[in-house]
Every structure is written in structure tokens, then in C-alpha cells.
Image: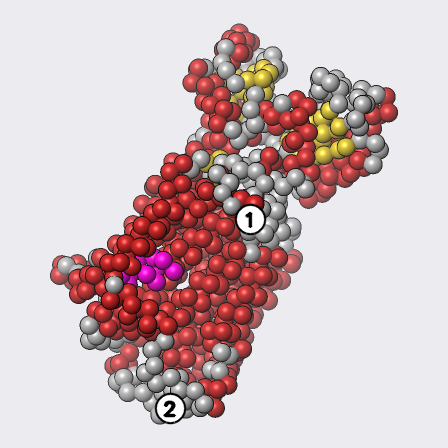
Amino acid sequence: MATFLYKLGRSAFRRRRLVALLWVALLAIAGVGAATAPAPTSGSFSIPGTEAQRAFDLLEERFPGAGADGATARVVFKAPEGQKMTDPAHKAVVEETVSALKSGSDQIVSVTDPYTAQAVSRDGSTAYVSVAYKVNGMELTDETREALTQAGQNAQGKGLTVEVGGDALQSMPETGAGEIVGVIIAGIVLVITFGSLVAAGLPLLTAIIGVGIGVSSISALANVLDLGSTTSTLAMMIGLAVGIDYALFIVSRYRAELADGREKEDAAGRAVGTAGSAVVFAGLTVVIALVGLAVVNIPMLTKMGFAAAGTVVIAVLIALTLIPALLGFAGNKVVGRKQRKGTVTTGDKPNGGTRWARFVIRRPLMVLLVGVIGLGAIAVPAASLEMGLPDDGVKPTSTTERRAYDALSDGFGPGFNGPLLVVVDGDKATADKTVSTIKGLEGWAAVTPATPNKAGDAAMITVVPKDRPSSVATEDLVHDIRNSTGDDVLVTGATAMNIDFSQKMNDALVPYLALVVGLAFLLLTVVFRSVLVPLKAALGFLLSVVAALGAVVAVFQWGWLGSLFGVEQTGPIMSMMPIFMVGVVFGLAMDYEVFLVTRMREAYVHGERPGEAIVTGFRHSARVVVAAAVIMIAVFSGFIGMDDQMIKMIGFGLAVAVLFDAFVVRMAIVPAVLALLGHKAWWLPKWLDRVLPNVDVEGESLAATTGGDTPAKPDLVKV
């Protein structure tokens, strides 16, 4: 592989104009495709194999056109102090709003009048209008959402407090500000790392090109492949992260080859042949993690994973071809001004990475114990992890959804924010028996009479829980209904769907971990030709992820330091969080592992002792890995400032996970373990050595390809 990549790098360097033109053309084609494609919907959403989904399917069959699995919204009206919603003036405003909602969109199934649907609170202070839609919240058009919001705003200025809530308003928040902050910090870190604006600009430029091609392609194919508007979010986040990382690795190795006195074209070839090999395998681990999301068997997640994986593949190809091409255009400017003038020589002076590696080698057991015990202590709260999908009750009080949620809770009780829909596959007698059974349970506030369909072979029952939708008591009520009724009774609705979604994610976590870590273990065994190094990499990753989950639980579930991170309301951890963190952080962690340890492996293969190889790996790679980790932490931290609780949680969790994995696991625990193992770290059974393909990540074959390791006549001073 090293020989092929070496030739690819040299070829891209020589034919830089053609290579650059091809990538620009791809960006233009993708951009035109995205601009001319129909605006994407939010994509369909289903959870195959769950009771909630079976109930929706049954409703669609027995109650055609009812939009049973469609989105819902509630427009909540609150009268001024001392007045009631039954006053004629207020009643007129509500009826006007009902009429506006009915004519606001062709996606609407029904709009209820609170005065005929008993949706006025006992004290008369609060009333709400329920809106049902034909499609779920992921498939509503922007025009439909705008009509809903506008109806509430029109009523707001007529003496009433009006708020709008419900899953019809769900949409991914704009995250541009966080990305911009991350890119700015990335630029600053790159300038400090390289001491050259040109060298710093290359990773940013190529990452943006890669993300542009990936996201534009997703937008262009959105309607054809039924990709939701949220699909590009993960692709953008991961694409930006790995795009900067991979380019950073190649540029750093290129500068090192120049410093060793090689000609530019040869240096570009060697950078791609060595660091490029690490990029290929690091990229493969990320792709495995993202494609592995298919294990969860939720179509939306599967599509998000494949789309993000495609963006990673683009990032790898750009690193292997566009980076060497742009290095050809950059010339000597890829190194700092002082180095070009020859005013800086480092000689054999140890850098920070060298000094740290020597410290770890002297005290490996102490460093290992401090790292493991420290992360273990932070991981303790993870044992109390409660998963669910946060409802409107955890949103900031500045949002209309949160204010509508609070108004409904005050006027009717918290359970009105998440009613359950019970579907009976049977006649009226079966339905009436089900109603009686439910009334014998605990935890409900109201149970409506059964509503049969025209054929009389199915019925719907609405159950309002006493507690809020995301509470343990409501989840217990759902399970009690299911356990105390037969197979012909199904519980669904947004609340039950969230419970089933959380359970499905929980059940998929272990198989997903086994698949991702198992395949990556095999891949790293091929890369490092060792059994213990991949095992150590996988165990270290698991430690950092569990510690990060512990930090997330402490802040978002327990409320520790919650005010510091803007957490207004504690609640369950988003059910996607563990799998999401495993997929994203595993990919990034393996990036750092592959790039750091391949330099150690390279030094060891070339004759250095284990301790010397660790120091050599850190001397060449520590600075780059630290820079890459700081950039990723900055990118993810930019999302902590978002108002949306889910985005805030994702940003915090990923930032903390990268912090733990890069600085504690890769930079401390990994060298400590390798120092303790010595030569045994690189042990491989003879039978396995014969079976495994030799991918030559260390670039041994390059000596024969380039006629030896003797550097060419230098054209730059040694740095």
C-alpha cells in the first residue's frame, strides 16, 4: 500500500493543476445539483419492530386518512389574571385561530375547538387547540410549520398569552455559529502548530471543500433517496472533523520530509505513502463505526451513518490527492518564514512530546494508574444512566414550546403534554374491557371512552398520564398497560414511540459496540501486526467513552455544574447519545491511535528499541495529535452554547470524550502500557503473521522504490 500511495502522492504533486481542477469541478457539480434539486423534506421516520410502530401501521390500515402517526401541535391560550377563556372576547379570538389553522395547510387532518372538545381547564384560565397532521413531524413542510407559528402570533396581540408546542415544531436548530467558532479556533491552532499561514490554511481549505462536496451531494440526492434535512448534520460535523485531521497529518509529514532534506515531489510522495497509509486505515475505522449504525435498524439513523461515511471517504481521497497537489502550488511557503530564511534550527533539542514521552517511560505504572483511576472515577455516574428522548420540558424558557408545555402542565396537569394512544384490534366489547383494565392501573389522570372505526373491528383509546412524558412513572404506565392487556392491544403515540425508540437504542448498544470494536480490532491487527496494541486501543477507547458518559450524566441528569453549561432542566440522557458517542468518538480516537502508534511502529521496525520507538513516535506526532484534538474539542464545544438541549448535550459529550481519549488515553495510558510491555507489545503469533496481509503502513517498501533512504540534496534548511 505504501508504494501505491507514494506513487499517487507524487503523481498528484506533478499533475497538481489537473487534480485541483477535478476537485473544483466535483464541488461545482455537487453545488449545482444541490441548488437545482427540489427542497428536501425532513425524511420519513419509522422504528421497525416496535409495538408503537405496529400500532401506527394498524391505525393506518383500520382508520385510513386519520393520520394516526402524524405530527401534533397544541396552541395554548391563557387568559389575563382574573379573566376566563370562556369570556366572549377571548372565545372569539380562539375561534378565529381555529379557522386560520384549518385553512393554513393541506397537511392538516383536524383542528379541535376547545369549547366542544372539553379542552378548557377547570378554573377557566387556560384552553388549548389540538392540531393533527397527515404526516409525522419529520415530513412537515416549512410552509406548514410557518402557518402554525403565524396563527399563534396573530392571536398573541389580542389580549391573550398564546404559546405553541408539540412535535410539529420539531426541527434541527441552526448550528452555523458553533461551526464558525470551531473553524476560527482551528485556524488559530493550525497557525500556532505550523507557524505558516499557508500550511495552516491547507487543512481548513480542503476540509471545507470535502464537506461542501459531501453535504451538497446529500442535498442533491435527498428526494431520490428519501434523506431527511437532518442527514447532513452528522455528515457536516464528522466531515469537518476528519477533514482537518487527515490534511493536518499529511501536511505535517510533508514538512518533516522536507526538513530531512528531500526534494519536494519526493517529500509529497513519502508523506502520502506513510502518513497517507495511516489516514486510509483511520478513515476505514470511522467508516466502520458510521456504517455500523445500520445495526440499530432505524432507517433514518442508517441513512445518516451512510451519508456521513461517504463524507469521510471524500475526506480521505482529498487528503491523498488534493493535499499533495496544493503542496505543489505552495512551494516553500508551506514552512514558516524563519525556517525559509534559515534563522531557526532545532537540531537535536527535545520538544514537548519528547520530554513527555521520556517522563512516561520513567514512570509508566504511576501514569497508567493515575489515568485509569481518574477516568474510572469520572465514569461512576454512568452507572445511573437513564435514557429517553427529552421533551419540551427541558427546552429553555425563552422558547414558545417550553412556555406552552408549562402552561398545559399548570392548567391541566403534566400528563397532558404526552397522552398515550391505545389501539385495540377487536370489537367494542374488547375495547370496553381494555378501558376497564386501564382504569384499574395506577398512574393515569384520564381515560377516554373507546372510539371505534367504521367497520367496528378496531378502536382508539386516549390515556392521559399523571406525570410528564419523559418521567419514569409514565414509562411504567406504558409497560403496565402492555403487560396487563393482550396481544390485540397496542400502545403508541409520541410518548410511547419515544420509549420504544430508547429501548431499541439501548438493546442495540452492545451488538453495535461488538461489531465496531471487533472489526476495528481486526483492522488494527493488520495495521500494527500486533495483538496487544489493538486490544489496548479498544479498551482505552471504552474507558474514555464511559468516562464521557459519566460526565454527561453528572451535568445533564444530576445537574452538577449545570448552570455553567446552561442546563435549565435536568432529565434523561438522549437515547441516541451512547451510540452516537461510540460512533463518532471511536472514529476520532482511532485517528489519533493510528497516527501516533504507526510512527512508533515505524521506528521499532527500523531497529529502535521499544522505549526509543515511543519517544520517536511522540517527537514526530505528539504536536500534531494535540493540535488535532484541540481543534476537535473546539469544534464540538461550539455546540454547547446552543439553546437546544439535545445539541448542547451532543456538543458537551463529544468535546469531553475527545478530551479524555486524546489527552488521557492516547497521550498517557497508551505510552505507559507500551513501555510496560516492551517488546511484547509488538508480539504476533507466527501462524497469524503468515495469514495477515502485509499492508506496509511503515513504508519499508519505499526504500526500494526510491532507491534507498538517503535524502536528496536539501532545498530547505533543517527544522
Q: In this view, does 319 lie above or below 95?
A: below
Q: Is residue 592 left or right of residue 689?
A: right
How did the renderer colour the structure?
secondary structure
- Which residue position holds label 2? 714
Residue 358 spot, x, y in % from top left: 28, 70
* Element marked by disc 2: loop
Tell me if mark 2 has few (under 14), some (14-19) or many (20+) residues whose alpha carbon lies within 10 angstroms of its own.
some
Q: Residue 655 carries which label?
A: none
Q: Where 164 sits versus 607, above or below?
A: above
Residue 614 or 232: which is nearer the viewer? 614
Secondary structure type for disc 1: helix
- The residue shown at (45%, 41%) is 553
Q: What residue type is labelled 2?
A: Pro
Q: What residue type is labelled 1?
A: Leu
> Image quadrant of residue 6?
bottom left
| Depicted 664 relative to depicted 125: above or below | below
Residue highlighted by disc 1: 564
